[in-house]
Image (cartoon, grey):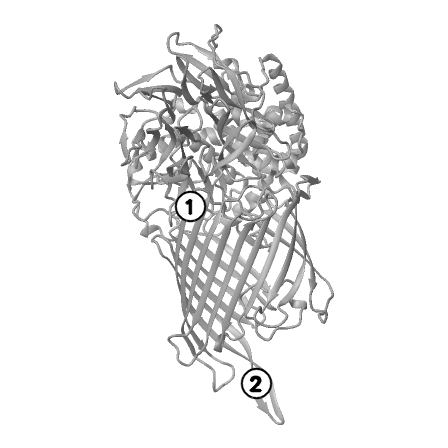
Amino acid sequence: MKTLYINKLLKINILSLIILTINTHTVFSQFFNDSQNHPSVKFRQISQPDYQIIFPEQAEADAQKVANILEEAIGYVSKTLGRSPRPISIILQTQTTEANGFVQLAPRRMELYTIPSQEFDFQDWLNSLVIHELRHVVQYDKLVPKLGAPLFEELKLALFGINLPAWFFEGDATLTETLLTEAGRGRQPIFSQTLRANLLSDRNYSYAKNYLGSYKNLTPNYYTLGYYMNAKLRHDFGPDILDKTLTRMANFPIRPYNFSRSLKRNGAYGSTSLYKKTMHHIDSVWRSENSTRTVKPYQALNNTSKQDPGNYLLPIEIDSNKILFLKTSLSAQNHIALLNDKKEQKIVTIGPQLEPNFSYANGNIVWDEYRSHKRYGKRTFNEINIYNIYTKSHRTLTKNSKSYSPALSPDGKKIIFVSVDSLGNFNLKEIHLNNKTTENILPGISGYTLQTPAYSKDGKKVVVTGVNEKGKTILIYDLDKKLWTKLFNEERQLISRPVFGLNGILYKAHYTGVENIFYFDFDSKKKQQLTYAKFGASNVSTSSSGNEILFNDYQADGYNIAKSNLSHSNETLDTNTSKYTPIFLNKLKHQENTQNIFSNVGNKMYPSKSYNETAHLFYFHSLRPIVENIDNDARIGFNLASDNKLNTFSSSVGYAYNSSLNANEFFAKLSYKKYYPIFSVNYQNQENLSYARLPVQGGSRLVPFTWRESKTSFEIYVPFFKNWLNKGFSTSLMVNTSYTQRSSPSLALLNFKRSLDFPMQYQLYLSYSTTRAVRDLAPKFGISVLANYQHYPFDNKVTGEYIYLKSALYFPGIFINHSFQIRYNEQTSSGTFIYNTNIPRARGYAHLSPIAKLHNTLLLDYRFPIAYPDWELGPLAYIKRFRGGIFTDFENLDQGKPFKTYGLSLGTDMNLLRYYLPNFALDTRFILPVQRNTSKNAIFEIGLTFNY
C-alpha cells in the first residue's frame, strides 16, 4: 500500500485549522479522496427525495439494494441524534478491491466500495457499510445544520473536524452499526482485542496514548476506543445525551473545547473523565468474565519483545524444527520469514495486503498483494504472487485481477483462491502450475461471499467460509463430484480460515466471547473447543506430523506462535451464542427499540436512468475567503470553488482587492481529470508594480510604475504509478505554457513589453522507493529526481533558458530505522532567468557570504530516532517520538571552498490539542558555518510543520 504524506507549512486561518474527511473500514485513509474512475465506466443513477445513488451500469442490483436499505434505515439511524439528514449523493465504487467507505463534503457525497474483505462482519457487507456511513451524514447535519452548498461546505467540514474528536464520530457510527443489526464490530472480540489485552495485562495507558497511538506499544485504534466511550456515555446518561450535546454545540460551533464542555453542561462527563470511567468499567467486566472462562497459557515459540512488539502470523510448520510465518511489526517492513529454534531468517519482503495471508507447499510460497492502477485511483487490483525458496524467484500470476486468499495444494501443483468478477460475484478459481500456467473457474454457489479457501490433505476437496445476510458458515466443495456441502446453518460468528484436520474442519470462532480454535467433526456433526487462549487464538494449521496444531496466541505485544496437541474431546460445545453478550449491548439495544432493521428491508425496484456526467460538471460548494499579506502585498477577497461528484472536473472563480495597489484582481481555474492526461487552465487579471530607472539631471533615479496584466496558463499533467512487492515507482510529466497581455502602463517606457508569448516549462519527475515501516524516518532505499526546463521558443524578443535538477537518494543507516540521505541539486540559467534559484540551499544560507551565482548543492543527512516517550502534556501536546540528526552542506562543488555548513538537528513528532490529525513536527537545527566571516558564529533555527 502506498502511503501519501502531504507536507505543508503551518498556516492557520479560519478555514484551514483542520478539515476532516471520514474514512472507514480501512487503513487507506487520506484527506479529500479526489481520485477518478477509469473513463470506460458508464454510470447510471437512482434519484429519490432523500438521496441520489450514482453507480456503474453493471451494479444495478447493488444500487437497488442500497436504495431499499436507505428507505428503511434513515429513520432508525437518525433517531438518537434527533435530526434527519439532508439529501446526499451516494456513489458505488465497484472497480476497487479494498473494503472501504467514506462521507465527504466539498462536494457533499458518500462513497461505498462494494467489494468486501476476506475478514469482515458476519452479515452482508453493504448492510453494515450503509448504516455506518449514513450515521456520519446525520452527524454532519446535526452539528452544522444550516451550512452547505453553494457557499459553506468546506466551512461545515472544518467546524465538524474542529469540534468533534475522531474517536467520537467513528465510535458513534460503529456503535450504531452494532445496535441496529445483529452483527457489527461491537460484537466481535477481535475488535476489542488490543484494548482488552492491554487492560488485563495491567497496561493502563493514558487517554492520549490510546486515542492518538504510539510508536512504542500496540494500542487500539480510535474506532475501538470511541465505541466503548460512546457506549459508556449512552449507558450512563441515556440515548438523548448525544442529541443534547450536539444541539448545544450547533448553537455556538466556535466555542473552545466545545465537545467536552457541552458534555459537562448536559450533566455528563468531560472527555478525560469519560475515558477513565470507561476504562474502569470495561476492565472490571472483562476481569469478571475472564474469571469464569477456562484459560490455558501457551508457550511462545518465537522471541517476544516489549521494546519491539510485533505479530508472527499464520504459522506453517514445514518440518519438525522449521516454521514459516508472516512478520509485521513497528520497526520492520512486512515479510515472510522462517523460524528455526527461535532464530528468524527473512525469506521475502512483501507488499501491502488487504488482509494478512500466505500459503506454502513444496518450496513455493503464495500470497496476494494490493496493486494500484497506473493512473486511476478508483480502479485497483489484488494479485497473486508466488516465490520459490530454492530458486529465490518471484512472479505475479493474476495480473490486473481481483484475486484473494490463495492456498497451495499439498503437492504444490495447484492454487485455489477467491476471485471476484466484474459484476461483483464471488467464485473459486484454480491455477495449475504446469509449464503453461492455466486457470479455471469452479462452479459457484449462489448467495454467499466466499472467504479464505484451503485444500484437503489429498487435494480433492476445498473448504471455504461462506457469508450472507444470515451470518457465516463453512462450505466444502468436492472437486471430483463437483458438489457443494454446507456443514451447518449460518451463525452470527466471525468464522475464519477453516482448514482440514483429523476427521473434520478446524476454524476460528468466538462462541465463548473470546476468539479460539474450534473443531467440527464430520461424523458426529458436533463442535469442540481446541484452544483456550486468554485474549484470542487464530490462524490455525496442522503440524507436519498431523498430531498437533499451530496457531496464533494474542498477547499485549502481538500475536505469538503457539502449539497444542490435536485430539478428539468428549466434550462438545454449546454454540448458543446468545449466552455471551458484549458489554453495554443489552441496555443500549433497548434504547433503540429494534433488533435488526434489515428484517424489514423491502425489495422494491426504483427507476434508474443514465447519469449524464457532462450535465453535472459544476457543483459549487464553498466560498473560500482570501485574507493574506505576502511580501507587503495585502489582499482580501474570495474564491468560489466547484468540484463535480465524480472528481473529474474542478473549477473556481474569484475576486480579490489589493489594498497595497488599490486595485481589483480576478482569477479563474478549470481542471479536467477524466482522461489519462489531466488538463488545467488558469486565468489571472491583476495589477502589477515595478520600478524603472529614469534619467534625471545629474544622473538617474528609480520611479515606480504599474500596469495591468492578464495571464492565461495551460497545463498538461501525465501521472504514472506502479507498485510490486515492497517497492513503488511513480513518474509524471508536466508541460506548461501561458500567454500574458500587459496594458495600461502608468509610464511610457520604450522597452515595455506588451505581451509574453507562450513561455514553455517541461517538468519530469521520477521516484522509486521501498515501503516504510511505522518507525522508519525515510525509505530504506529510494531515489527521486525532478528535472525542469523553461524557455521562450515562440518569442524572439525574450531570450534565456532555465534548467534545474533536484535529486535525493535514500539508504539504510547503521542501526534499525536509521536513514542516510544524499541530495544533489544543480541549475543553470541565462537571459530572463538569470536570477532564478529553485534548488535547495545550504542550511543557514541567509547568514553566509552571498554567492554571485549558485550552480549546485550537495546536502547530506543522517537521521535517527532517539526515544518514544509517549508523554502527555495535559491537553496541549502528546509527544510520540524524539528524533535526531547530523548534516553537512556544500554549494558550488566545482569552485573553491564548497563546504558551507554542518550541524545537529533535534525534532519531535507530536499531536497538538488532542487532535488526531494533523501530525505535527517541531524541528530545531544548530548550524555551524565553516566560514568565519559570516554574520553569526552559530545559527539556531526552529520550525513547525504538519502532515496528514
Residue 599 in the image: state x and y as whole percent: 39, 22
Q: Is residue 764 above or below residue 795?
A: above
Residue 76 in the image: state x and y as whole percent: 46, 28
Q: Is residue 422 above or below residue 14?
A: above
Neighbourhood count class around disc 1 (C-alpha, 10 Å): few under 14, some 14–19, many 20 upward? many
Q: Quadrant of residue 588?
A: top right
User: Seen in the image, is 824 located left or right of residue 129?
Assistant: right
Label annotation for residue 67: none
Q: Is residue 208 above or below residue 14?
A: above
Q: Which residue extends farthest bottom?
A: 697
Mark yes or no: residue 71 visible: no
Q: Secondary structure at mark 2?
A: strand
Q: Quadrant of residue 933?
A: bottom right
Q: Which residue extends farthest right?
A: 937
The reply to whether discs 2 and 1 touch (Cβ–Cβ < 8 Å) is no
Q: Which residue extends farthest top?
A: 570
Neighbourhood count class around disc 2 (C-alpha, 10 Å): few under 14, some 14–19, many 20 upward? few
Residue 332 in the image: state x and y as whole percent: 55, 39
Residue 111 in the image: state x and y as whole percent: 41, 40
- For mark 1, what is the residue? 723
Mark 2: amino acid: Arg
Q: Which residue is nearer to you in this view: 62 or 84?
A: 62
Q: Secondary structure at mark 1?
A: strand
Mark 2 vs mark 1: in front: 1
Q: Which residue is nearer to you in this view: 166 or 836?
A: 836
Mark 1: amino acid: Asn
Q: Identify the residue at horizontal 53%, vertical 71% (top origin).
A: 836
How many numbered tags mark residues here? Answer: 2
- For mark 2, what is the residue? 693
Q: Identify the residue at horizontal 36%, vertical 33% (top origin).
A: 67
Q: CA distance from mark 2 to mark 1?
A: 56 Å
The first of marks 2 and 1 along the sequence is 2
